[in-house]
Image (spheres, coloured by chain):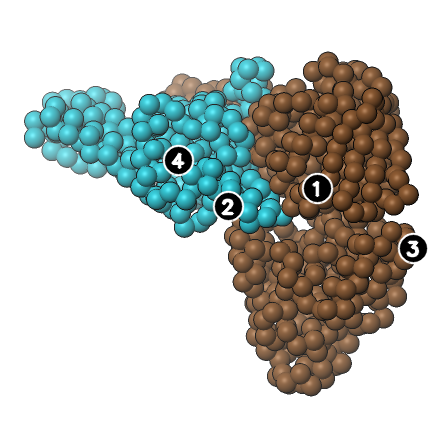
Chain colours: A brown, B cyan
Amino acid sequence: MKKRTLAVILALVMILSLAACGGKTNTPAAAEHPRKAAGELIAGIAQDLDESLNPYQMVSAGEKEILTNVYEGLYKVAPSGDYIPAVAESYTVSEDGTVYTFKLRDGVKFHNGNTVTVQDVLDSFATCKELTVDSSLPSVLDGIEVKAEGNDIIITLPAANNDFLAYAALVYIIPSGSAEECKTNPVGTGPFKFVSRSVQENIVFEKFADYWGEPAKLNKVTCKIYEDNTAMITALNAGAIDMACHLTLDQIAGLGDQYNVLEGTMNLVQALYLNNARAPFDNVKVRQAMCMAIDVDELLSITADGHGTKLYTSIYPAFTKYFDESLAKLYPYDPEGAKALLAEAGYPDGFKTTITVPSNYTPHVNAGQVMVQQLGRVGIEAELVEVEWNTWVTDVYKGRNFDTTVCGFDASTLTANALLSRWVTGASKNMISFSDPEYDELIAKATAETDDAVRTDLYKQAAAILAKDAANVYTQDLAEFTVLNKALSGYNFYPLYRIDFSTIAFN
Amino acid sequence: MKYNIRKLCTLIVTVFIVSFLAFAAFQLIGDPITHMLGTEATPEAEEALRESLGFNRPLLVRYFEWLVNFLKGDFGVSYSYNLPVHDMVVPKLGVTVTLTFFAFILTVLISIPLGVFQVRRENSAFDRIMTIINQIVMSIPPFFIGILLTCIFGLVLKLFTPGLYVSFAESPAGFFAYLFLPALSIAIPRIAQVVKMLRSNVLQQMTSEYVLTAYSRGMNRRQVLQKHALRNAMIPVATFLAVSLAEMLAASIIIEQIFSIPGIGRLLLASIGNRDVPVVLAIVVILALWVILVNFAADILYQFIDPRIKNE
């Protein structure tokens, strides 16, 4: 009997000791970072790049921000928001604004070793026009004439378009005829080149030694995919990954002290978007009342400990050129005033409605929950309905079958048009069916205007109309956090989706 | 024999009915066009892509085309990744199957000795405590145990680095070491079930007539247990274990999420979200085949170890 007991106990001990052999033991950050010598960074990303890797077919922001390390256009975005030369060395514009001449930079190499020629640029423009999934590009690229003269690329537009540089920057330069290959094996001119990927596991990039500009400081970057939030934080704490972006406040709360936390903004416009085509939201008084019913300060403090930047129209605060702080005075928090307006509009006892949110975006879900409470205070009984992302896109965004929804709109290019042209009457992307003839007129005038100061003023006026008409209940540009292991530094925030690995280095 | 072959044929047909149902389900939840082109695509671009991928054809036509290709071994190309489905699914299947078998082996190795040990100590303090522990552990879902083990071994004892999945190619030893805790999470509730089952079966056997005969022939309790009761009690346990193999694959799918293991579970969930039909169908068929074959094997096993069944 005793022998048997001993045998069983020994067996159990043996099994437990197997667990001890598994995995590496954790040493505190006092020792040198294990990957410093190799110059290797492991970053955690929340979603796999499960789409075509072809630059003109990139759909999600997550993919664009990673692949902009591999692909470059004639010009590219700098952290300040300005466009700086990339594959092109410089450009000039004709007096009337219709002819752009880009001077191709000498000696730019592709990741496959070939030198970039003007033919590659011409073919890139042609391929982009054919394949692009960004619906703002075809209208810009249609009717332009792209030709080469020596080392110059001359682009003639049918009419002056002051935002053209921003759109041209989206035409990433790839080798002629490589569109099909780029779907699974990207080839570009950027500081990092694509090495390999393992579906749902990781994507590996390597430093491109022949980069035309300042070479990357790291030798290798591996992006590991962690779809589960808890798993990402556990991996960060265990030192399995060194960096993660787009984290929320509660995620960083669980983080140890071997990380620096950097705060940035998401560069989007979060709001309770109201279906202007559906009663009672077709009544401007109801919309105004809802603006007065939502206390954005309280919302920020509950959902994000006060982090986040308030906004009042469809322009995010980082876009300083167009952001107008004075719009805050229009509809300050005033529940009594809201109730009075509702009564005026014919709803003295409030009304029932639904708030549809995409369930995968926790910040929007959380904001929705707070709003349900706040709207309840003025008699509006709102029900929060969570739906899956694709369902949200089909039903709410495209089908426009909703009462209200909480989501965030970003800009595909750093232009006022990208944020404002959406809301013109009858526009295909006008999810809320907003309609104001004065607004339409202002947008049309601004697009055609060549003088920058006049343009800016026209756009600001249009944005002010969105605020005055209370098209939506505007809330905030969300704060987001990037964490970087203390052994590393050099991360810069961009006003557009871009995670730039080339400036990050070990200390 | 004829019975077995007929059964096998029915089961294969079941697999294809399942695949058809999965195919038809996508008709309801939508196509991958939005995922491929994004929210900003024009309706014309969407329609053009829909046409070129053949989504406008009738359901049955598309299903039969898929079926014919599938039987030829061509699983199609993923809409999301543009990679052949076969190349995507097979390595991940290897990982999930390894995890499942690892859990299975752990279950068998731990539960049977533990069960026998408990039976020998019937009515002792150990027996009573084990019964209570079994009852509790049996009902804890594997994913919760997974989270608990991650906390204890990963964050408190620091014996295990969560998230640092090591692929087989990188290091076989590291691979199995990393899979140990996930396999254990799946195994623990199952172990509790098997131990309970074993215990009650054996004790039931001990009250049957042949045992009385054995005692009267001079066998002591220990010998009766070992030579007769245990073997007879094992019959339902063996088939239970065989059927568990099917359930363990399902449990692996959930555990994969917690331990960030790149298996077919995660791929399946992501592909459903992306409406990536070829990948989903390939995985659904594989899962259905697995369940059916495991059950079939359990059936045959049962026929072998219980001679009474064969003669019926």
* Left or right relative to B257: residue A373: right
B213 or B287: which is nearer to us?
A: B287
Given this view, does label 4 or label 2 mark the residue nearer the observer?
A: 2
Q: Residues within 10 Å of mark 4 (few under 14, many from 20)?
A: many
Q: Residues within 10 Å of mark 3 (few under 14, many from 20)?
A: few
Q: Is residue B42 left or right of residue B283?
A: right
Is A138 or B102 nearer to us in this picture? A138
Look at mark 1 in the image and give the residue it sits on.
Answer: A143
Q: Position of residue A360 (x, y in %)?
A: 59, 49
| Residue most extreme to the left | B312
Q: Quadrant of residue A368?
A: bottom right
- Disc 1: host chain: A
Cα–Cα gap, marks 4 and 2: 24 Å
Q: Identify the residue under disc 4.
A: B281
* Residue in the picture at 81% in, 47% down: A160
Mark 4 residue type: Leu
Residue, disc 3: A453
Q: Earlier in the sequence, mark 4 or mark 2?
A: 2
Question: Label 1: how many residues lie within 10 Å, few (<14), some (14-19) or many (20+)?
Answer: few
Q: Are marks 2 and 1 on the same chain?
A: no
Q: Which residue is mark 2?
A: B47
Q: Position of residue B138 (x, y in %)?
A: 40, 41
Residue A288 falls in image quadrant: bottom right
Seen from the viewer's position, the closer of residues B306 and A217 is A217
